[in-house]
């Protein structure tokens, strides 16, 4: 999901800031034993949206727990590709917490005490998805198609192509020589027969 050089650099920087595997205290002998986090339960089973590259701008995230379909590092890259920033610990600068299963109790208590907005992986993916430009389907219109105007338009008119000016399939076009106003296959413009 991350193909450009900037994304790879952001990933490397994010990996340096992401939490280490959960620390688990052992009885006797002192010290900590690192236990690897379990993989996301739905790893690779969700479509990762591409949204506006600034949709998370100004947001600073902390990730805790096991996410549903992405590793923390992947979520950090996704956030940075959309203008967000991911840090490894809760502070006054954090605006949002992405919460997964088995979230750390200490981190959760700090998130709650600082009134940081909490969200799931799915909620963040939806923010990104909704930021993507929405392309509305073109309404069905009795008008020109990629094959040319309907036969009914041609009746009583010269068949030479110069009778029809320019037609745009991208937005707004103008048919100039036949008394027809603006025509568009995307629903923008007007059609007149006079």
Image (cartoon, rainbow, N blue to C red):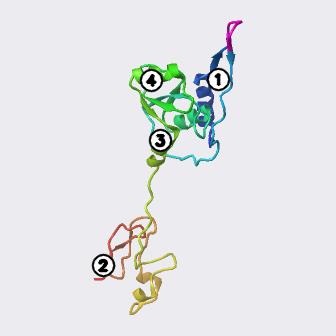
- The residue range painted magenta reads 26-32
On residue 123, which mark appears? 3
Nearer to the camera, 27 or 64: 27
Location of mark 2 (residue): 192
Q: Is residue 27 visible?
A: yes
Distance (Cα) linking label 1 and label 4: 19 Å
Location of mark 4 (residue): 111
Is the residue marked by circle 2 packed among few (<14), some (14-19), or many (20+) residues within 10 Å?
Answer: few
Residue 57: x and y, percent? 44, 35
Nearer to the camera, 121 or 149: 121
Residue 153: x and y, percent? 40, 86
Distance (Cα) linking label 2 and label 3: 46 Å
- Quarter occupied by residue 64: top right
Closest to the camera, between mark 2 and mark 3, is 3
Name, please, the residue furthest toward the right: 29
Location of mark 1 (residue): 21
Is the residue marked by circle 4 packed among few (<14), some (14-19), or many (20+) residues within 10 Å?
Answer: many
Distance (Cα) linking label 1 and label 3: 24 Å
Q: Main secondary structure of the magenta part?
A: loop
Closest to the camera, between mark 2 and mark 4, is 4
Count of numbered circles in the view = 4
Secondary structure category for the residue under label 4: helix
Quadrant where the C terminus is found in the figure: bottom left
Name, please, the residue furthest toward the front: 27
Secondary structure category for the residue under label 1: loop
Q: Residue at x 38, y 76 (%)?
A: 175
Secondary structure category for the residue under label 2: loop
- Point out the tag, 2 or 3, that comes first from the N-terminus: 3
């Amino acid at each position: 999901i991350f193909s450009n050089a900037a994304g790879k650099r952001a990933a490397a920087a994010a990996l340096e800031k992401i939490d280490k595997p959960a620390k688990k205290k052992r009885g006797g002998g002192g010290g900590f034993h690192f236990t690897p986090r379990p993989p996301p339960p739905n790893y690779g089973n969700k479509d990762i949206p591409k949204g506006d590259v600034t949709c998370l701008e100004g947001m600073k995230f902390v990730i805790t727990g096991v996410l549903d379909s992405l590793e923390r590092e992947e979520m950090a890259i996704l956030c940075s590709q959309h203008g967000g920033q991911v840090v490894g610990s809760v502070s006054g600068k954090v605006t949002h917490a992405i919460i997964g299963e088995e979230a750390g109790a200490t981190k959760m208590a700090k998130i709650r005490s600082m009134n940081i907005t909490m969200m799931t992986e799915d909620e963040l993916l939806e923010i990104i998805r909704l930021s993507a430009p929405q392309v509305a389907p073109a309404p069905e219109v009795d008008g020109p198609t990629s094959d040319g105007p309907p036969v009914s338009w041609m009746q009583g008119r010269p068949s030479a192509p110069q009778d029809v000016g320019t037609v745009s399939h991208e937005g707004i076009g103008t048919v100039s020589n036949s008394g027809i106003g603006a025509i568009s296959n995307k629903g923008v413009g007007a059609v007149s027969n006079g």
